Image: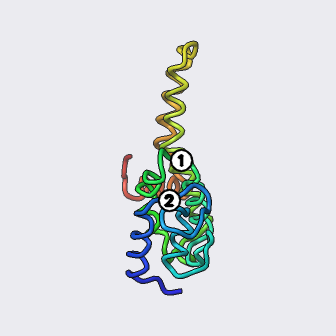
């Protein structure tokens, strides 16, 4: 399927009416983000728009079904991603997407948990180690990124 700007506009129109937790029913404001995309593309009600990479689809389903404060908040939070995913099938490498998603989680989410653990009463003795671990996570790179950085340092004298 060739995704068009009209499809993207229709996705936004449907998403802006709200998104439900779970598949929902085929009525604007009462369906999940993937069902909204299916509706915008003229597909049967479901959660597989057929133009979205499977890793991106799985990630979006997980995000959709989190405990958002409201269906309106869910729609606002997923609006841009609903459009960005269009046409990702055959373009986004699922393995690379999953690796990058894991890396971004390590860089952004794990440090928050480590710092929260550092502030638990009784963990004062480990506070410095937990902060170092948090900084290490924030600076984490995929192996290929570390290899490229090491090569740049050797060849060009870059210091990061």
How busy is the neighbourhood of tag 1: few (under 14 within 10 Å), some, or many (20 plus)? Answer: some
Q: Position of residue 10 (x, y in %)?
A: 41, 75
Q: Residue furthest bottom?
A: 2
Query: What residue is at 56 percent from the left and 69 percent from the top?
Result: 35
Q: Position of residue 140 (x, y in %)?
A: 51, 45
Q: Nearer the viewer, residue 157 or 96?
A: 96
Circle number at residue 77 = none
Q: Label 1, on which residue? A: 105
Circle number at residue 19 = 2
Question: In the figure, 42 relative to 146: above or below?
Answer: below
Q: Secondary structure at mark 2?
A: loop
Q: Nearer the viewer, residue 112 or 41?
A: 41
Q: Secondary structure at mark 1?
A: helix
Lateral position of residue 138 relative to residue 61, left or right: left
Lateral position of residue 145 relative to residue 50, left or right: left
Query: What residue is at 61 percent from the left and 78 percent from the top?
Result: 44
């Amino acid at each position: 399927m060739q995704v068009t700007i009209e499809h993207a506009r229709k996705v936004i129109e449907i998403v802006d009416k709200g998104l439900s937790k779970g598949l929902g029913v085929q009525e604007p404001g009462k369906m999940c983000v993937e069902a909204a995309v299916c509706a915008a593309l003229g597909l049967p009600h479901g959660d597989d728009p057929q133009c979205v990479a499977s890793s991106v689809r799985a990630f979006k389903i997980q995000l959709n079904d989190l405990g958002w404060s409201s269906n309106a908040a869910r729609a606002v939070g997923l609006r841009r991603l609903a459009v960005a995913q269009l046409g990702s099938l055959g373009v986004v490498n699922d393995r690379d997407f999953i690796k990058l998603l894991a890396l971004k989680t390590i860089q952004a989410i794990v440090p928050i948990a480590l710092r929260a653990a550092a502030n638990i009463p009784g963990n004062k003795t480990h506070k410095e180690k937990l902060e170092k671990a948090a900084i290490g996570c924030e600076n984490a790179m995929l192996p290929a990124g570390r290899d490229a950085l090491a090569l740049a340092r050797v060849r060009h004298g870059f210091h990061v």
